[in-house]
Image: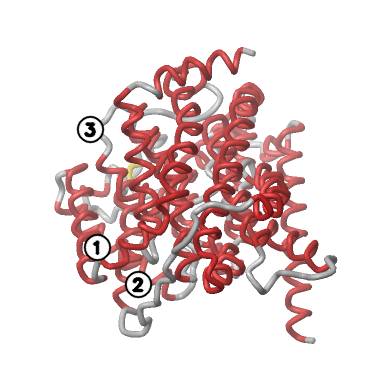
Amino acid sequence: MESIMNLMDGFGSALSPMNLLWVIVGCLLGTAVGVLPGLGSSMAVALLLPMTFALDPTGAFIMFAGVYFGGLFGDSTMAILMNTPGQASAIASTFEGHRMAKAGRAPQALATAAIGAFIGGMIGSIVVVFLAPALADFSANFGPQEFFALALFAFVATSSVVADSILKGLCSLIIGLGIAVVGIDQTSGAERFSFGVPQLFDGISLVTVTVAILALGEVFHIASRVRRDPTNRVIQAKGRPFLSGREFREALPAWLRGTGIGLPFGVIPAGGADVPTFVAYGLERQLDRRRRKPQFGKGAIRGLAAPEAAGNATTGTAMGALLSLGLPISATAAIMLAAFEQYGLQPGPLMFDRSPDLVWALLASFFIAMIVLLILNLPFAPLWAKLLAIPRPYLYAGITVFCGMGVYATSGSTFDLLMLLGIGLLGFALRRFGVPLAPLMIGMVLGPLFETSMRDALASSNQSYGVFVDGPIPVAIYTLLALSLVISIVGRVRSTARKDT
C-alpha cells in the first residue's frame, strides 16, 4: 500500500508540464535514434548524457527512461522493415517480423511490436513498483563482501555467459577495468597508470568513454563498411496499423509468455534483453512445432510477439535492479548508472530514502512512457522509416560533431577530445574483431565498487580472504554464478556437438 501511495506522489511530479515534456522528448529521441541503422538505445543515452547536465536530475532521468524504452522500439522497427536490428536484443524480432513485412503484413508486424512492448513494459513497471523497494530493503543488509560478490557476478556473467567467445568477453572486461583504475588511487593517493600525464590524474571520464565506445566507434565501423554494405530496401508499411481480433487472440498468449520470460532477466546480470528475447522466440518455436499447421518460417505473429514483450519486460525490471541494487545488467543500464554518478547520486538501498522524489517520479514516468510510445508508434511507426532518407555521410558526420561537442561541453578540455578520438578508435577495433562492448562498460562502471568492496572487506577481516564467503548472501551469489557458468558451458558443448554432426 505504501508503494502505491509513493507511486501516486511520483505521478504528481512526472505529470508536471515540464517533466511530461521530457518524457515525450525522450520517447521521440530514443525511437528516432533506434530506427537509424547501426544505432540503438545505448547510443542514444550515450549521446544525450553530456547534454543533460543543465537539467535537474528528475527531468534528466525521466528523459533517459523515455530514450531507453523508445530505443528498443526503434530497434524493432528496423528489424521488421529492413531486417537490420539496431541492437542484439532486436535480432530475434527479425526472424518472423521481417517475413511478415515481406508478406505484405508490415503494419500488423509493427502493431504487434508496439503492443508487445506496451504489455511487457507495463507489467515490468508494475513489478518494479513492488519489487524495487523490497530489493532495496533486502540490499540494506549488504556489506563489502556482498557487493564484491555481486560485482564479480556481473563481471563473469556478462563476459562469459553472454559473449559468443569467453576469451573476447574477458578481454573486453579487462579493458573496462583497466580504464577504471587510471588516475590517483583514492585510498593510498598513489598515481596509477597515468604515465605522468596531469590530465589523467583524475581518471578517464565516464562520459568520454561512453560516447567514444558506443557512438564514435560505431561511426568509424559504419564508415569502414559503407562500400561493402549496400543500402537495403525498406519495405513500405501500408495498410491497417492495427490487429484484427483473430490476430490479437493469436498474439496475446505469446505476449504474456514473453513477458513472463523477460521479467526475471531484469535482475540477472546476463547482458540485458538479448538472452530473454531468444529464449522467448525459442519457446514459441517449440510450441509451434506441436501444432497441426506450423506457421514459423512463414511470418508467425507469435514469433514476433514473444521477443518484443520479453525485451521490454526485461528493461522494466532492469531499471528496478539499477535503482535498488545499483546493478547494471546491460550496457545501457551501465550508462544510466554513470549518469547517476555524474549527478552525485548512488543507486542502491539508500536511494529510496535519500532521493524518494526522484525515484518515484522516475518509476511513474515508466508508465507514462509506455502510453506515449504506444500512441506514437502504433499509428505512426512507418513514418520513422523516413529517417533513412538522410544520406549516411551527413548522418554520421552529424553524430561525430555531436560527440565532440558533447564531450567538450562537459570538460572544456581539448585533451578530452583527443581521448575521445583514441577511445573511439579502440571501440572501432573491438567491433572489427567481434569483441562485445557490454563487459567493457560494466567493468568500467562497477570497477571502483569492486575494488573498494574488496579493500574494505579485507581491512575489516585483518586481510583474511575467507571474508568473501562469510555469510549466506555471498555463498548464494557464488552458487548462482556457478550454475550459470555450468548451464552456459553445457549449452556451448551441445551447440558445438550439433555443428560437428
Instruction: Tell which tag, 3 or 1, sits nearer the viewer.
Output: 3
Q: Residue at the location (71% across, 54% down)?
A: 250
Query: Whole-percent x and y of residue 128?
Result: 60, 31
Helix, strand or loop status at disc 1: helix
Q: Camera-side residue: 68 or 113?
A: 113
Kind of residue at disc 3: Ala
Kind of residue at disc 1: Leu
Residue underneath mark 3? 54
Residue underneath mark 2? 221
Q: Which quarter of the figure has residue 296?
A: bottom right
Q: Residue at the location (37% across, 62% down)?
A: 385
Alpha carbons under labels 2 and 3: distance apart = 31 Å
N-terminal of the two: label 3 or label 1?
Answer: 3
Quadrant housing the N terminus = top right
Alpha carbons under labels 3 and 1: distance apart = 25 Å
Query: Whole-percent x and y of residue 209?
Result: 34, 53
- Left or right: 395, with 155 as reference point: left
Query: Whole-percent x and y of residue 479?
Result: 77, 46
Q: Which mark is residue 2?
A: none
Kind of residue at disc 2: His
